[in-house]
Amino acid sequence: MKKIGVVGLGIMGSGMAENFLKNGYELYVWNRHPEKADSLVQNGAKLCKTPKEVAEKTDVVFEVTANDVSSKQVWTANDGILAGARKDSVLIASATLSAKWTDELAKLCQDRGFTFFDMPLTGGRVAAESGNLTMLVGGDETKLEELKLTLKAIAGKVFYFGPAGHGTRYKLLLNMLQAIHMVGFGEAIKIAEASGMDIDKVSAAFVDRPGGAITTIAKTSYHNQPDPITFSVEWITKDLGYAKKLADSLDTPLLDDVLTKYRAALDSGKAQTDWTNINEG
């Protein structure tokens, strides 16, 4: 059984780490605030002092930090993952990052002879805690097959999109579409309210048509914000900004409007509220 490393213990990283422990893996973890690892250590994880130490002691390393800035630090610093990785290591970026940085990271790993996957996640807190994440993968498809057994500890589905960088590109497009839907749901509900309609009936019908998981999330959270939050206004705004950079010079009026709306929410002090909070007010 492979030794697993998790660098970054936010909502997703903590859930992944817990499920590796539940499935009997030897686990090494690092987090900028080490106290976040306390419960994992009590359950058998080993807390490392640096990302380098995690890479030195494990066969597979998952990086699950916040953004490009934190990702670059844990990968490329003198005490980072790349400084400690072995030639037979499998290195995985599971944070939602920009396509530009993911491509740079893939090249850094390739030049050093490391196996690298960009493997962002979807499914939110519930999927992370239940071991039912969906993994969105870019990298060597043959080597991915060799990793499937390990991924069963944390994931219910694995989607492969092509070379390194393509998993990240899909994740940015997915979050863009979901954010557009979230904003559209809120506008539809406001029109229904203004028309004197029964909002409970309207919301329930939307779950059937157009349906889908994102509609269910929007319905559940529109008037009752989740506690704890599942995904913050801060992080969806970050992801939409990365999606806009991916679009480059393409005309993207829907993305532009939604990004503007989330940035306004961020500026109004809603950074740490749930991303569904965009529909309030």
Image (cartoon, grey):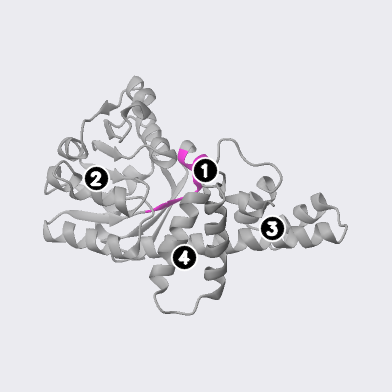
Quadrant assignment for the N terminus:
top left
Residue 236 on image: x %, y %? 49, 54
Dot 3 or dot 1: first in sequence order is 3
Q: Is residue 65 magenta?
A: no
Task: Please name the residue that numbered disc 3 is placed on.
Answer: 186
Element assignment for label 2: helix
Mark 2, residues whose alpha carbon is within 10 Å: few (<14), some, or many (≥20)? many
Gap between marks 1 and 2 measured at Cα:
23 Å
Give the vertical position of 155 relative to 248 (above or below).
above
Element assignment for label 1: loop
Task: Please name the residue that numbered disc 4 is placed on.
Answer: 173
Q: Left or right: where does residue 9 sit relative to residue 264?
A: left
- Nearest to the observer: residue 40 or residue 147: 40
Q: Nearer the viewer, mark 1 or mark 2?
A: 1
Task: Please name the residue that numbered disc 2 is placed on.
Answer: 74
Element assignment for label 4: helix
| Residue found farthest to the right | 196
